[in-house]
Amino acid sequence: MRFLPLLLANLRRKKLRTALTAGSFLVALFLFGVLAGISSGFSDDVNLFDAYRLVVIGRTGLMQLLPLSYYDRIKRIPGVADAAYSTWFGGVYQDPKNFFAQFAVDPEAWHAMYPEFVVDPPEWRDFVADRQGVVVGRKLAQRFGWKVGDHVPLKAPGYLGGGSWDFNVRGIMRGTRPQDDEGQFWLQAKYLYEKAPRYWQGLVGWYVVRIKSPEEAVRVGRAIDGEFANSASETRTQTESAFAASFVKQMGNIKFLMLSIGSVVFFTLLLVTGNTMAIAVRERTGELAVLKAVGFSDRFVLGLVLAESLLIATVGGGIGLWLARGAVAQDLAHGLILMYLSPAALAAGVGLTLATGLLAGLLPAVGAMRLSVVDALRRI
């Protein structure tokens, strides 16, 4: 009963200083949460791709289109269970800044290839039946306020002939896992071939192959590439996770960058908070001496100062993590990066908050515990 009133009174003594110190934790933990979400999008999710899927692209990269005639030949290769194809559309909605992933697909084959994305059966049937129909991810629909039945015009890129292409939202897609990308836009490949210039007929961007066993990934990949070796359109086949990792490598060592930034931020926070607590203890030297003189133990004084530091850290850090979780859920990158704040990252944030608060208050608390009553009162 004596501890809490003293703790709250100390925090209210310098309200602005307390608020600014808690705000430092808020900013630091908010930054930590956003960086952790970005890091997960770049690296952690790579390990979550289906081990049964391979990606087949042109040997020189995604810009090299592949013949549609490869589709049946790939499906006949031993070890291949199924295949699907996709082509990047690259249309613009209202403003070029409104970037989102747009794939022209064969509906049934693509849906079978990615069962983790769920669409209500009636909506899916409407999508398949409508040549201009599209399925959009839940987050993408929320971003633009789209709903089933809306008409969405996209300006096609120049390589597809330009002009406005009209689409009908027939379904809303949702992922079955928190990290699934719900910012995608699926249109029908047959509509692409219908409106695109003639030279697009019979071409696709890439293939996705489902294999019968992950242990056969290397063999099947080599068989696919061997099938089209020395042709005009040679291929390069990778596991889905390796394909995703290739994009991460282009961005450099993301984890090291995040760790470096986070370390600097928390070291600075530790110094700032430690200095703040040291000043607060010096200002209360006389009061702490009086507490000891009237019978409060050294451990009580130690706990009082540590509790003050931990409470400031917990309140500020907790709000920062809460805001970061909300920001990541709002898809700050608008589909450019899959952002996902995992429970492990949240736990790490809580641990860093408590550790920083404890370390920042430890030296001032020990100094207060060792304070000599006689020397302190002599200074008053």
Image: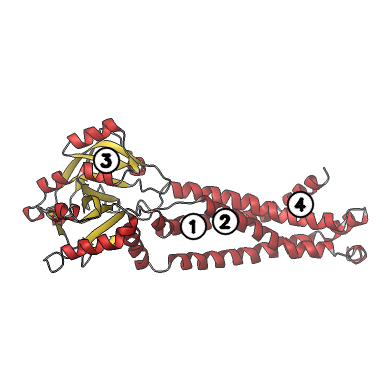
- State the CA–CA distance, disc 1 to disc 4: 34 Å
- State the CA–CA distance, disc 3 to disc 2: 37 Å
First in sequence: mark 2 vs mark 1: 1
Q: Is residue 72 above or below residue 141?
A: below
Q: Report whether residue 219 is seen.
A: yes
Quadrant in which residue 302 is drawn = bottom right
Q: Return the x and y of residue 77 as percentages of the image width and height.
A: 19, 56
Q: What's under tag 1, amino acid-wise?
A: Ala
Residue placed most toward the observer, 28 or 21: 28
Q: Which residue is mark 3?
A: 135
First in sequence: mark 3 vs mark 2: 3
Which residue is rendered at x = 45% and y = 50% of the image? 328
Discs 4/3, front: 3
Q: What's under tag 2, amino acid-wise?
A: Ala
- State the CA–CA distance, disc 1 to disc 3: 30 Å
The residue furthest front is 78
Q: Which residue is mark 1?
A: 36
Q: Quadrant of the C terminus?
A: bottom right
First in sequence: mark 1 vs mark 3: 1
First in sequence: mark 2 vs mark 4: 4
Q: Quadrant of the N terminus?
A: top right
Q: Return the x and y of residue 256 as percentages of the image width and height.
A: 47, 68
